[in-house]
Image: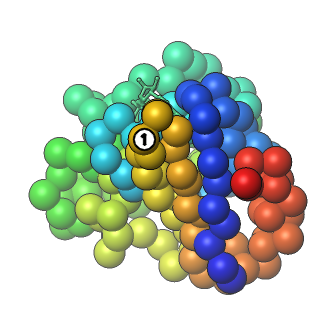
Amino acid sequence: MEPIRLWSADETTTKAIGAALAGLLGPGDVVGLAGDLGAGKTRLVQGAADALGADGPVLSPTFMLVREYNGDPPVHHVDAYRLSGPLELEDLGLEDVLSADAVVFVEWADRVAAALPESWLELVLHIGDDDHREIEVIPHGDAWAARGKPLAAALDPFTR
Ligand SMILES: Nc1ncnc2c1ncn2[C@@H]1O[C@H](COP(=O)(O)OP(=O)(O)O)[C@@H](O)[C@H]1O
Ligand SMILES: [Mg+2]
């Protein structure tokens, strides 16, 4: 499946993209985010987590590695910024974080790519001039190939 390219003029739109994605997410799904500091990874997760009914406020987990929120389904929010590699994430109990019962968001997913499951949704955020963001949505694995149409439909309002 081709990547889907999205355009976000402001943080409200980036949160709305997260909320639109949330409608497709269920227990066991993993969403990995990549992009520079300040690209909007946490904003997007906030929009998605709010839509999933997470008992917010959803904060950047940078200093905690993992935050877990009650929600329907529960939301696990990982920030791999400070990890040196996937082994370290395993040491920290990756099996529990990548729970079959929860939706899992992983910031800096590119740093722990080897630890991710076969099916996951990759979001790459690029900072443009004048503060807009371009967001590439790249489905990986069978679970996302099967959801290609609803994914494209949900994100269509944010394509250019
Ligand atoms: N289009 C946009 N989408 C998301 N954030 C934006 C956008 N334009 C400006 N911002 C600002 O960029 C910052 C993004 O922060 P954050 O989501 O914490 O980034 P990250 O988690 O990638 O480090 C916020 O201060 C937000 O207000
Ligand atoms: Mg962040």
Identify the image's colour scheme: rainbow, by chain, secondary structure or one colour.
rainbow
Looking at the image, residue 12 lies above or below residue 138: above
The image quarter containing residue 16 is top right
Q: Does 66 sit left or right of 148 as displayed?
A: left
Q: Residue furthest top?
A: 57
Residue visible at 79% across and 71% down in the picture:
147
Q: Which residue is mark 1?
A: 129
Camera-nearest residue between 7 and 17: 7
Q: Is residue 107 left or right of residue 50?
A: left
Q: Which residue is painted at 23% across and 29% down in the image?
A: 63
Q: Could you say which is closer to the camera, residue 61 or residue 124?
A: 124
Left or right of 121, for residue 2:
right
Q: Is residue 29 left or right of residue 39?
A: right
Viewer-nearest residue: 11 or 106: 11
Residue 150 location (% of width, % of height): 85, 63
Q: Residues within 10 Å of mark 1 (few under 14, many from 20)?
A: few
The relative height of residue 4 versus residue 89 in the rendered view (above or below) is below
- Give the number of marks: 1
Image vertical order of residue 125 relative to residue 47, above or below: below
Query: At numbered mark 1, what does the secondary structure look like: helix, strand or loop?
Result: helix
Question: Is 88 or 128 nearer to us in this picture?
Answer: 128
Identity of the amino acid at label 1?
Asp
Picture quarter with the N terminus: bottom right
Residue drawn at x 68%, y 42% as measured from the top left: 17
Quadrant of ligand 1: it is top left
Residue at 43% over, 51% down: 126
Residue 108 in view in this figure: yes
Q: Locate residue 35, reporting x and y percent.
A: 37, 51
Asked if residue 76 shows in the view, the reply is no
Instruction: Give the percent coordinates (x, y) of residue 33.
Output: 45, 53
Place residue 140 in its image quadrant. Answer: bottom right
Residue 141, image quadrant: bottom right
